[in-house]
Image (cartoon, rainbow, N blue to C red):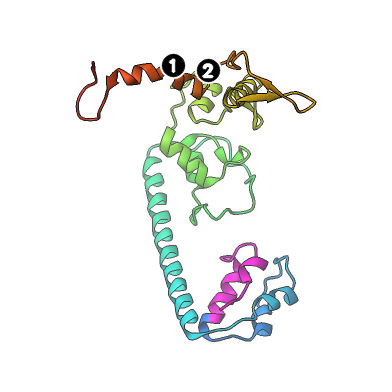
Amino acid sequence: MNIQLHYVIATITGVTGMRIIRAIVAGEHDPDKLAAMRDVRCKEGIETIRGALVGNYRPEHLFALRQSLALYDFYQQCIDECDAEIEKAVAGLNIGRPMPDDPLPKAKHRSKMPSDPNSNVRRAVYQLAGTDLTQIHGVGPFLALRLIGECGTDMSRWWTARHFTSWRALSPGCKSAAGRCCRRTRVKQAADLLSRSDSRRSRSGEAIPRSVPSTAVSPSGSAMRRQLQPLRATSQCCFTTPCVTK
């Protein structure tokens, strides 16, 4: 249809996007009327949305859009059924478990994420864990459910919080810090590059012959291949029989 609605709207499955898509499927193709369905919370103006809705509403494209919308609605129905089953499962785990004495604190995250369950499981998770995990920055109801489903509520298996974050692969690697390679890694990379080059250049641009291999930090791939070449000539290996040395 050559419409550019997905470029002017942040989320095509939001309120404004779904209103316009359902209206197009219903038979409304006037850009002015479609742009008037914009939600008040949408950042883009009506004129911008109207310009993005000018296109060719061909029958075959409308048929494909109708099929896609039907699949989207079916998947949303399946997600709602899964949320209902999750709510029943969490309620079954809370049977015989007392509610904490402290009242449930106010929700720290007011905005609802697309991955959050449609049912209100925050109170059930609070009763199951004994504390409100959603008070942690960046943890919502969906992530709290996932943590409990994978780790449980018994945290005695990890000695400290550092052990837990290391097990969850949340701590950075020892060879990088803030997305940057450490000095030892950079020196190793520089040595590998020098070892692959046939000559080095001075400041004046003249080529300096390489008299000493630049593999003081670690041997490069080419140096290792040169060392292993005599061994390859005296051995024969295949995937089906063991190696036999001649």
Q: Given this view, does label 1 or label 2 mark the residue nearer the observer? A: 1
- Per the image, label 2 sits on a secondary structure element best described as loop
**Amino acid under label 1?**
Gln
Which residue is the site of mark 2?
A: 219
Residue drawn at (49%, 81%) of the image: 62
**Amino acid under label 2?**
Pro
In the displayed structure, does residue 1 sit left or right of residue 52? left
For label 1, the crowd category at 10 Å Cα-Cα, with few meaning under 14, some 14 to 19 and many 20 or more, is few
Rendered image quadrant of residue 47: bottom right
Where the C terminus falls, by quadrant?
top left
Which residue is the site of mark 1?
A: 227
Q: Is residue 151 above or below residue 208?
A: below
Q: Is residue 110 above or below residue 43?
A: above
Question: 64 or 149: which is nearer to us?
Answer: 64
Residues shaded magenta:
1-24
Rendered image quadrant of residue 20: bottom right
Place of residue 160 in the rendered image (x, y in percent of width and height, measured from the top left): 53, 20
Place of residue 207 in the rendered image (x, y in percent of width and height, measured from the top left): 70, 25
In the displayed structure, does residue 14 sit left or right of residue 117? right
Place of residue 51 in the rendered image (x, y in percent of width and height, measured from the top left): 70, 77
Question: 229 or 158: which is nearer to us?
Answer: 229
Cα distance between the residues tagged 1 and 2: 10 Å
Q: Is residue 170 above or below residue 117?
A: above
- Per the image, label 1 sits on a secondary structure element best described as helix
